[in-house]
Amino acid sequence: MTLVEPGHSALMDRVYRNQRHVYDLTRRYYLLGRDRLIAGLNAKPGMSVLEVGCGTGRNLVAASRSFPRAAFYGMDISSEMLATARSAVCKARLEQRVSLAQGDATDFDPGLAFGVSGFDRIFMSYTVSMIPVWREAIEQAMRNLAPGGSLHIVDFGQQEQLPGFFRIILFAWLRWFHVAPRAALREVLQEIAETHGATLDFQPLHRGYSWLAVLHRRP
């Protein structure tokens, strides 16, 4: 099994080789809804939580502090981003509670990477818009979800209630960073929920600037 897709991995390394050093400082102003997603994880003591596309580790550190008795895991396709994530985890002194691994979200084996069979919570924060085969990544996340678990997603919406010019400017700017907001996200998530016997909660935030979704898998 291929853990890392070479072409996309190399692209992400090129994109973030330098950006990773200022990523959190710059993204805090427009990656809206991340903290709301983290609060909604509601990770109980003993639960296992995976972030798909953990990037710099910012979300993992925040989630670990919010739920200090849960175990956290992070995976990313970019070795450059993982280097920053490891540094962030060490700086926060969370090495004993946060494990990291490189891998492809569309073909991620938690047993091979972490020695666990699945996760009680999985979250994807502004990850779906960066994965070319994003539906496959969500499907794989659902397969890695334990019965009774939930998959939490936040990403760019379609700016439904914002001025048209704002959407044009934002989407053009995002393309420079290989980011593509998924207009069909809600419909695809509903199909995936039905396939996996799950329920879907879907909520636009900030007048459609971002979308927050939670898929609840039945026990």
Image: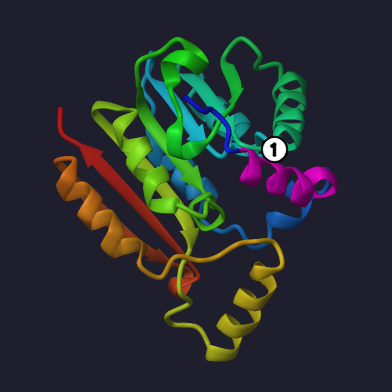
The residue shown at (60%, 75%) is 171
Report if residue 192 lies within the magenta region.
Answer: no
Magenta span of residues: 6-20
Magenta segment, principal secondary structure? Answer: helix
Image location (x, y in percent) of residue 34: 53, 49
Q: Secondary structure at mark 1?
A: loop
Check residue 8 for magenta coloring.
yes
Q: Tell whether 177 sits left or right of 71.
A: right
Callout 1 amino acid = Thr
Indicate the quadrant containing the C terminus: top left, top right, bottom left or bottom right.
top left
Q: How many neighbours does mark 1 have within 10 angstroms: few (below 14), some (14-19), or many (20 or more)?
A: many
The relative height of residue 152 versus residue 84 in the rendered view (above or below) is below
How many numbered marks does the figure carry? 1
- Where residue 7 appears, as percent x and y from the top left, is 64, 45
The residue closer to the viewer here, 2 or 155, is: 2
Q: Quadrant of residue 108?
A: top left
Comparing 98 with 175, the one in front is: 175
Residue sitting at 65 percent across and 77 percent down? 172
Q: Is residue 22 visible in this depiction of the protein?
A: yes
Relative to 39, is 91 above or below?
above
Answer with left or right where residue 9 lies relative to residue 148: right
Vertical comparison of 68 with 83: above or below: above
- Horizontal and vertical percent position of residue 109: 43, 23
Q: Residue 58: where, in percent of width, then height?
A: 65, 37
Please determine whether, in this image, residue 8 is positioned above or below residue 61: below
Residue under circle 1?
56
